[in-house]
Amino acid sequence: MDPESRRIRGQQLLLFSGIAAAALIAFAAWFSAGGGEAPPPRSGVRARLAGPDTAETTWVRRSEARIGQLEARLREMETKNRRSDQENARLRARLKRNAEDGRLVIDRQSAAIDELRRKLDARPVAPPQTKRSAPGGRTSQGPGGAAPAAPMIREFEKTPDPADEDGSGAGPRPLSSWLPAGAYAEAVVLAGVDASAGVASQGDPRPVLLRLTGRARSAAADGEAMEADVAGCTLTGAAYGDLSSEKVYVRLRTMTCAGPESGTVIETEVSGFVAGGGKAGVRGPVVSREGALVEKAFLAGLVSGAGETAANVLQAPAGTAGSENAASLGDLGRAGLGAGAGSAGRRVADYLIRRAEQYQPVIQLQTGTRVTVVFIEGAQLDGREDRKSNNNHGRSR
């Protein structure tokens, strides 16, 4: 090897040795600094710092949800306040009507008392009678010694009965204690009925129960109908069906309302009817169940006719002799079967016809049906009976 090659090789070895020494020094420094330790374990939860935009968005969403809840509560409170205001308005109107009715009754009673007082003041008072002795020791009254005639009743006068001043007699009556004729109110059927539509159904009506759901409207004053408070009262009636109109007709009997004191009720006999769709009577579905029985009776009649025909055909001719005319045992058996079938079919047909006659079509008045109740006669609402006549009081003049 020439000297030049030896020199180049020595330089390369020197360079490699420097690089290896530098690498060894770097490895020693890394190892001494703790780089050889095992990396710390990683948890399954990764944390990420939220930026300003993310935090602001979260706060805005929470604020909007809170504001929505507050708005919902506010709307609920407003609804409750409106309901309370409406209820207070109704109560004030009712109290006002009651106060007006009370003032009207008091004014009428005061007028009646004043009228009685004026009549008592205008009644003539008889002068006192004086007695004096007449000649002969007899006592005489008045001039001439003749005794005055005894007072006699010359005229009767009808005076108002104080018991009628409360509105139970003739004349104006307050709606707080009187349900006028012609009043009408909305009602709902509590206990329906299957009203018979037979010929004699009116003689055997079925009971029905209704509840009034509104106030009874009556005559109008100044463009507004006057009302009587009968909401919540129950009515009993008698119902019967009419097949020609497919309606149930109800006649009212008794009305029961809450009394003025707690735990008391008032029962009043009423007269009226129930209307539906603007006409008297309530239209309902017609149920007829005799069709199947009539069909069975028809089939039984066919069997009866066929059996009797077969029995007549297979009967042996009377007054004949010979084997060619004599009926065989088979013909006799078939004739007997035909006669038996005819008799059985006839009996079954008669039985089914009698059963079908017992089935009468009915018209249903369903529970929950909205109807209108019309009162055709006035009735008391305070529990007192209506006085049909006034007492006559005599007075002498």
Image (tube, rainbow, N blue to C red):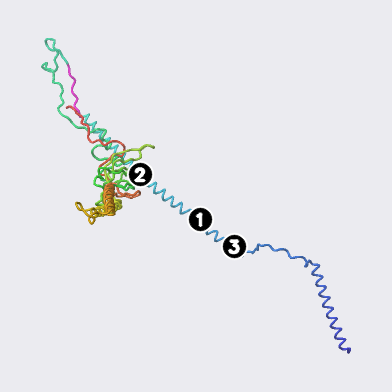
Query: Is 5 left or right of 128, judged from the image as shown?
Result: right
The kind of residue on which mark 3 rests is Ala
Viewer-nearest residue: 138 or 87: 87
Amino acid beneath label 1? Gln
Badge nearest the viewer, 1 or 2: 2
Kindly tell me whether residue 232 is visible in this rendering.
yes
Q: Quadrant of residue 251?
A: top left
Secondary element type, mark 3: helix
Query: Which numbered marker is on residue 232?
Result: 2
Residue receiving disc 1: 69
Amino acid on which disc 2 is placed: Gly
The disc, 3 or 1, on the residue closer to the chain's N-terminal end is 3
The tag earlier along the polypeptide, 3 or 2, is 3
Q: Is residue 69 magenta?
A: no
Most foreground residue, 122 or 161: 161
Q: Quadrant of the C terminus?
A: top left
Q: Which residues are magenta?
A: 122-130
Q: Is residue 21 above or below residue 339?
A: below
Residue at numbered disc 3? 55
> Of helix, strand and loop, which one carries label 2?
loop
Is the C-beta separation of discs 3 and 2 under 8 Å?
A: no
Q: CA distance from mark 1 to mark 2?
A: 38 Å
Above or below, 159 against 237 in this view is above
* Residue at the front extreme, as displayed: 322
Q: Which mark is residue 173?
A: none
